[in-house]
Amino acid sequence: MARQVAGSSTSHRGTPEHTHPDDVPVQTALAALADPVRLSLVRELAGSAEWSRSCGSFDVPVGKAALSHHFAVLRAAGLVEQRDEGPRRVNRLRRAEFDARFPGLLDLVLREVSHNSRR
């Protein structure tokens, strides 16, 4: 069940719905992390301060609609939380909550990305 996070929205879009990691099956988490674009988003968020990255600040090879879809998948997997700050939608990686649900999974995935990028 999606738990809504309160936030003030001044734009035409609705407040994003978030799924708490406790409500996520492992298959959903793995599927979210299997996509290269979503993995790139998670990796960039892992190296950024919370709430410092707007959706448009990521260097990914997809358009706005596809990026929106990727963030929706990450929210549904309990990996990302978003909130609106004026016209910007900002993001944070739900590292602590996700690690509590799936201990070591993010460390493994992020380490694997780092390891593969050195090849």
Image (cartoon, rainbow, N blue to C red):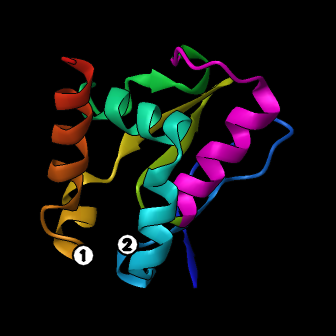
Q: Is residue 83 magenta-colored?
A: no
Q: Is residue 107 left or right of residue 83?
A: left
Q: Residue at x 37, y 23 (%)?
A: 52
Q: Is residue 75 magenta-colored?
A: yes
Q: Would residue 8 be visible to someone looking at this image?
A: no
- Looking at the picture, tell me which residue is in the foreground, 27 or 79: 27
Which residues fall within the magenta stretch?
58-76
Q: Quadrant of the N terminus?
A: bottom right
Q: Quadrant of the C terminus?
A: top left
Distance in Å between CA atoms under marks 1 and 2 = 6 Å
Give residue 37's position: percent from left, percent from top. Answer: 54, 34
Give residue 53's position: percent from left, percent from top. Answer: 44, 23
Please tell me which of labels 1 and 2 falls first in the chain: 2
Instruction: Assign a secondary structure to mark 2.
Output: helix
Instruction: Assign a secondary structure to mark 1.
Output: helix
Q: Is residue 1 left or right of residue 118?
A: right
Q: Residue at x 43, y 52 (%)?
A: 33
- The residue singled out by tag 2 in the image is 21
- Looking at the picture, tell me which residue is in the foreground, 45 or 31: 31
Q: Is residue 35 above or below residue 26?
A: above
- The residue singled out by tag 1 in the image is 101
**Hey, what amino acid is under mark 1?**
Arg
